[in-house]
Amino acid sequence: MRKIFVFTLFICALSLASLDGFAQARRITKPPPSTAPADVRAASTLYEEASGYAARMFQEFQSKKLPFDPKLLEKTVREQKELAARYAAELVARSNLSGDDFYYTGLLYHLSANEERTLEFLKRFLDQDKQAAGERPQFARYIVTLRAAQMNRLEEAETALEHYLHFEPRKISEQVTMENALTGAYRKAKQMEKASAHAEEAFKSAKSLQATAKTTTADRLLYLSTIA
């Protein structure tokens, strides 16, 4: 039971650290210099390795029965961002990027907290087929909405949200998060009418999610929609 509790602490702390990193995304993580041979693995493989880095490390810490350490958490999250930044740079250095390569490069930049490059590559991915539906285009639109709202590029955020709501699959949890992001951005810009409109949509979506999914996530999103 104690092992499970410690591991849970690591995962919860990682989630909080990720949220904090998203909120402070202007602190761009630069890839450390490397003299190693270029990695020729697929973009999807590089992303999966980078995105799963922290979880793998925490499993290793658990197997070694290490107590929870905030400094170790911070170090692990920093290493994950650096790994993502390095992999993104390696992909950009290739001359044959196409298709889903842009998607995974954008996600690597997102993971490394480089917001400008995140938008650049995810928009390149979406521009290949603006009518595309499916998990990847929808997740790309979700991230673009959040990043653009965070950067006060509100027209871009609105467009990405509009496209997200036009295609499938749609996740209510993602819609609530996007509406909340735009609510906060418009309040910061002192555009209260638009902020109120998005706040109302966030609350309605969160209420519908709570009615169908009795989970702590649904409760948290409903709470956040009331304070966004």
Image: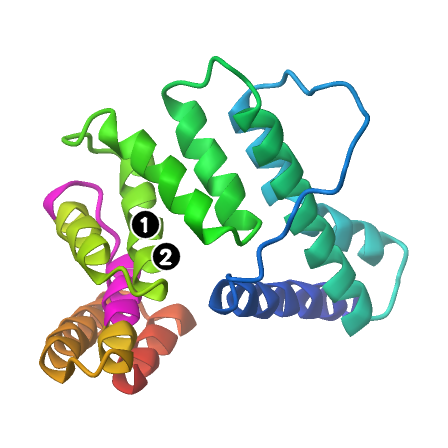
The residue tagged 2 is 147
Camera-side residue of 65 and 30: 30
| Residue 183 figure quarter | bottom left
Q: Quadrant of the C terminus?
A: bottom left
In the rendered image, which quarter contains the N terminus? Answer: bottom right
Name above or below for residue 11 compared with residue 185: above
> Magenta includes 85?
no
Residue with the mark numbered 1: 144
Position above or below: 62 against 24: above
Question: Can you tell which quarter of the image residue 184 is in?
Answer: bottom left
Q: Position of residue 192 (x, y in %)?
A: 15, 84
Which scheme is used to colour this image of the protein?
A: rainbow
Q: Nearer the viewer, residue 5 or 226?
A: 226
Determine the image quadrant of residue 38. Answer: top right
Residue 91 screen position, x and y as percent: 56, 26
Question: What secondary structure is marked by label 1?
Answer: helix
- Is label 2 in contact with label 1 (beta carbons under 8 Å)? yes
160 left or right of 125 in image: left
Q: Is the magenta region chiefly helix, strand or loop?
A: helix
Q: Residues within 10 Å of mark 1 (few under 14, many from 20)?
A: many
Magenta stretch: give its range: 166-182
Furthest toward the bottom, the residue is: 227
10 Å neighbourhood of mark 2: few (<14), some, or many (≥20)?
many
Quote the CA–CA distance across marks 2 and 1.
Answer: 5 Å
Residue in front for this viewpoint, 199 or 2: 199
With 149 as the anchor, is 75 left or right in this view? right
Disc 2 on helix, strand or loop? helix
